[in-house]
Amino acid sequence: MQFTFKTLYNQKSLSVMAKCIRKTVRKKRSKRSHIFGWIVFVSALLLSFSSGDEGVVIDFRKIITWTAALAILIALIFENQINGYFARKRLLKGTEKAVSTFDTENTDSFMSETAVGKSEFSYDRIGLIAETDGYFVFVFSQSHAQIYDKNNLSGGTADEFRKFISEVTNKEIITVK
């Protein structure tokens, strides 16, 4: 039996991949960054609206403070999309579309093919496996992952693949919401 995924590395898929990395291997760091970001955001607003003897006066310094606070807020809210955007910018030309093949007879490695060429990946290099509603994500490190589109899976069902990949890697699949 052979499972085949056809995946587009586009803004949507790369944002999901960024989210999976953030919620798994970068979880502690992400939480600290979010706490710090919200503290800075709230502090900037409180300090800019604190009134002195003259009341609230809009000046160049407050406009800069509000702009910085807005930038922090946007980064906190759209973090996954921003990280996905930069990941897309770093993609090599020709790697936007990947066809990955998982042969149930080969329990050592799987193949991925792009316009650039074919690559073989060993299952033991996978750090963890995450799953969302539409994707499986193999996380290799804090900055490297691969994503597989469930909607473009052939050769079996998502349930069958989940069972296969869990057995061959000896890893539990983490569900990311």
Image: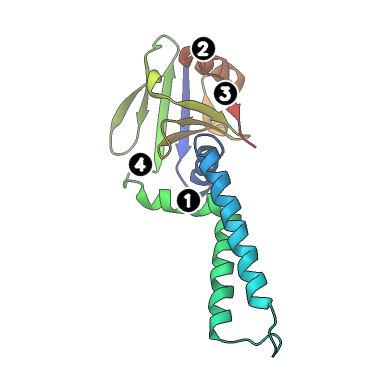
- The residue under label 1 is which amino acid type? Asn
What x and y, as percent, mark residue 175? 62, 30
Quote the CA–CA distance across marks 3 and 4.
26 Å
Quote the CA–CA distance across marks 1 and 3.
23 Å
1 or 4: mark nearer the eye: 1
> Which label is found at residue 173?
3
Which mark is first along the chain, 3 or 2? 2
What x and y, as percent, mark residue 137? 50, 32
- The residue under label 4 is which amino acid type? Thr
Residue 144 appears left or right of 14:
left
Residue that mark 4 sits on: 95
Residue that mark 1 sits on: 83
Q: Is residue 11 above or below residue 163?
A: below
> Which label is found at residue 167?
2
Quote the CA–CA distance across marks 2 and 3.
10 Å
What x and y, as percent, mark residue 81? 53, 52
- The residue under label 2 is which amino acid type? Glu
Q: Are marks 2 and 3 in contact (CB under 8 Å)?
A: no
Which mark is first along the chain, 4 or 1? 1
Quarter the C terminus occupies = top right
Residue at 71%, 87% in the rendered image: 55
Residue at 48%, 44% in the rendered image: 14
